[in-house]
Amino acid sequence: MRTPRITVLGLTLAGVLLASTTAAAAHSTRTTQETAAAAVGPVPTGSAALKRNPLYRSGEMTLACGRQPQDSGSSAAVKAHLSAMLGCLNTSWAAQLKKAGLPFAKPKVRFITKPTRVCGSKWGEHTAGVYCIRQRQMTILIDEEIAEDPANPVLLEILAHEYAHHVQTLSGIMGTYARLPVRSKAHALIYSRRLELQAECLAGVFLSSVWDSQEYTAEDWQLVVDSIQGSGDDGLDLERGHGKGDTRAAWLQRGFDRVSPAACNTWSAPPARVA
């Protein structure tokens, strides 16, 4: 399977357009405190949005997701499977944001069978998915290779990563990122890596929460990790806006192991951990 890449488009950071391209645990029962409905408060801004976001205090993601259809052989089957998994993403992240006292809204979703322009930009090489920030829209490319196996866990990781960018938008992280002062392109890429690696970690959180219910195996997880590890900036001769392969895999694994957004505070991590 080709190395998947994921793109975040439509974000201007201090005048620099950042088109950043990327590609089972037993869970404890939630306590009464965790399940109590949280009042929706204001979306954080500034340093608080990045380093002290209430999302980090929302606890483990514990909602189960029923086994989803996995017919193969057509783009329609892939769309049906991803749409079902999207329902799981909506339910899980809505509950997580509610616990954090943050508002929730579903993203717009578009499935395409050939590359097209999105967010006013050309579809990038190696790109499997795009999240348009201003439109709050996810676009997933369903090609013939993907249609062979709709339940490929790598494809689910792509969907979960895209959705993680939407979570960053809802929680105020993306808006704060867009307003960060940038001294140089290299400086902008450091911020981009923190954003992308956080999305990788948040994707791992969701994947862990549904891994057993979707009957994936340890071998399936290794396939996902290997794919992400092989799509780092260091291996594909790309701008350093996403992180090295080992770094991306490490944050994905961290989210999977902890099953909580608390594991995903890349904004407080030392530079060596977001290289």
Image: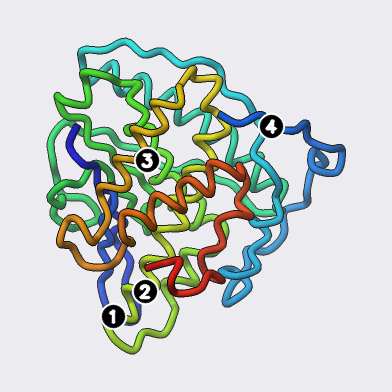
Q: Is mark 2 on a helix, strand or loop?
A: helix
Nearer the viewer's eye, disc 3 or disc 4?
Answer: 3
**Is 28 displayed left or right of 151 in the figure?**
right
Colouring used for the render: rainbow
Residue at image coords 85%, 43%: 33
Give whichever of discs 3 and 1 has the lower sequence position.
Answer: 1
Q: Which amino acid does label 2 sit on?
A: Ile
Label 1 sits on residue: 186
Label 2 Cα crowd, 10 Å radius (few <14 / some 14-19 / many 20+): some
Contact check, label 2 and label 1, Cβ < 8 Å: yes
Residue at image coords 63%, 73%: 48
Between 7 and 198, the residue placed more toward the observer is: 198
Rendering quarter of residue 161: top left
Contact check, label 3 and label 1, Cβ < 8 Å: no
Q: What residue type is labelled 4?
A: His
Label 2 sits on residue: 190
Label at residue 225: 3
Give whichever of discs 1 and 4 has the lower sequence position.
Answer: 4
x and y, in percent, of residue 86 in the image: 45, 31
> What is the C-alpha distance between the residues marked 3 and 2?
23 Å
Which quarter of the rendering shows the N terminus?
A: top left
Residue at image coords 56%, 62%: 265
Label at residue 27: 4
> What is the C-alpha distance between the residues marked 3 and 4?
21 Å
Between 104 and 237, the residue placed more toward the observer is: 237
Give whichever of discs 3 and 2 has the lower sequence position.
Answer: 2
x and y, in percent, of residue 231 in the image: 25, 49
